[in-house]
């Protein structure tokens, strides 16, 4: 039987093949931000009764169960991870980033918490140049700097009292930026499934003994929200990790500023957190920097050659 090629399918394949790795990574990163923003809303809803450590454990265990078919399929690679110390470091950084990030959104506004966390972009960009030896052109540095100026305008660090929970958000940002680099360091030989599996194992091993001290049996409503967070976490983590493995860290890092626009919008829409004029001005700078980065990544001259095979 002769199979007649479908012109539309051929066109889709050609379109996907023509996209630069950095552009695809940018799109995956933006999708992960949309997904993770909903998780922040769920966290604020359960945060009054459920401790952050318990949220992390439940979310991680449920997400691991959901991804178990994927892990089983790639078990041959997962059983033989390369650079186990890198996986251990990634898990430790994940615990710090998640604990600090979730705590900050409970105590300060979505816009402020997200704006402070944007400093992880600067950390990731600097480490990309120093550790990964990635080329960071002046245009990317400029886009990152403009975005960070927007963040400073919104946070007003020298214009009034500094909330101590802002320091918690900053600590999470530092861990998140370093974590981005660990993903990229292992991208040449570890699959996304291997990265996520061993990160989950380390996270569960670290928070498991602590959760017995703060455990609260969730209500039916809280249980639904916790499971929803786990679903969101699984999807968002896959999108985020895949983006980091595919694109240059320095190229996609400035896109983190888009999180600020999304989170500020949710804070206003759901919790009546009205952005100030300085927040709006800063958001314009942030959005402009992120939009430029997406356009820059789309150009063939900024194609990122993979450091190694993405799958084996």
Image: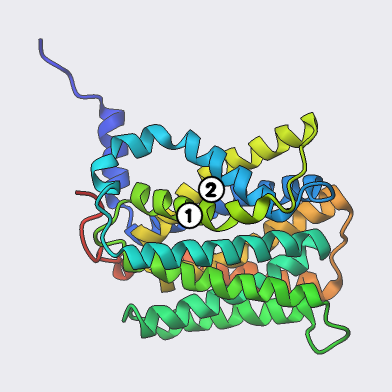
Query: Badge 1: few (under 14), some or many (20 or more) residues near its Cα, within 10 Å?
Result: many
According to the picture, the residue beneath numbered tag 1 turns out to be 240
Please, which residue is most extreme toward the left here?
Answer: 1
User: What's the distance in space between the residues labelled 2 and 1, CA to CA?
Assistant: 6 Å
> Could one spot residue 251 in this view of the protein?
no
Of helix, strand and loop, which one carries label 1? Answer: helix
The residue located at (10%, 10%) in the rendering is 1
Per the rendering, the mark at residue 236 is: 2
Query: Badge 2: few (under 14), some or many (20 or more) residues near its Cα, within 10 Å?
Result: many
Q: Are marks 2 and 1 in contact (CB under 8 Å)?
A: yes
Q: Which one is nearer the viewer's eye here, 119 or 102?
A: 102
> Could one spot residue 77 in this view of the protein?
yes
Whether residue 16 is situated above or below residue 303 in the rendered picture = above
* Spot occupied by residue 165 in the image (x, y as percentages of width and height): 78, 72
* Spot occupied by residue 52 in the image (x, y as percentages of width and height): 71, 55
Q: Which one is nearer the viewer's eye here, 37 or 68?
A: 68
């Amino acid at each position: 039987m002769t199979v007649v090629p479908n012109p539309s399918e051929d066109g889709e394949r050609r379109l996907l093949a023509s996209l630069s790795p950095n552009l695809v990574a940018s799109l995956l990163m933006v999708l992960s931000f949309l997904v993770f923003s909903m998780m922040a809303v769920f966290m604020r809803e359960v945060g009054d009764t459920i401790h952050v450590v318990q949220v992390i454990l439940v979310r991680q265990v449920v997400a691991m169960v959901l991804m178990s078919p994927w892990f089983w399929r790639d078990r041959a690679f997962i059983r033989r991870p390369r650079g186990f110390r890198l996986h251990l470091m990634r898990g430790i950084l994940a615990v710090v980033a998640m604990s600090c990030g979730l705590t900050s959104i409970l105590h300060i506004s979505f816009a402020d918490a997200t704006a402070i966390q944007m400093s992880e972009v600067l950390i990731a960009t600097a480490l990309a140049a120093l550790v990964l030896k990635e080329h960071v052109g002046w245009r990317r540095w400029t886009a990152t700097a403009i975005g960070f100026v927007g963040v400073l305008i919104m946070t007003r660090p020298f214009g009034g009292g500094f909330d101590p929970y802002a320091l918690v958000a900053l600590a999470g940002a530092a861990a998140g930026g370093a974590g981005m680099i660990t993903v990229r360091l292992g991208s040449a030989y570890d699959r996304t499934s291997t990265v996520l599996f061993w990160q989950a194992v380390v996270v569960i091993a670290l928070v498991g003994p602590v959760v017995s001290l703060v455990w609260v049996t969730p209500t039916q409503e809280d249980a639904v929200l916790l499971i929803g967070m786990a679903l969101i976490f699984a999807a968002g983590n896959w999108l985020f990790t895949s983006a980091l493995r595919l694109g240059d860290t320095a190229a996609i890092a400035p896109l983190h500023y888009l999180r600020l626009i999304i989170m500020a919008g949710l804070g206003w829409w759901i919790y009546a957190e009205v952005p100030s004029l300085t927040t709006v001005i800063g958001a314009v700078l942030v959005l402009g920097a992120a939009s430029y980065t997406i356009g820059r990544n789309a150009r063939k001259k900024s194609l990122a050659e993979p450091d190694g095979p993405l799958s084996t």
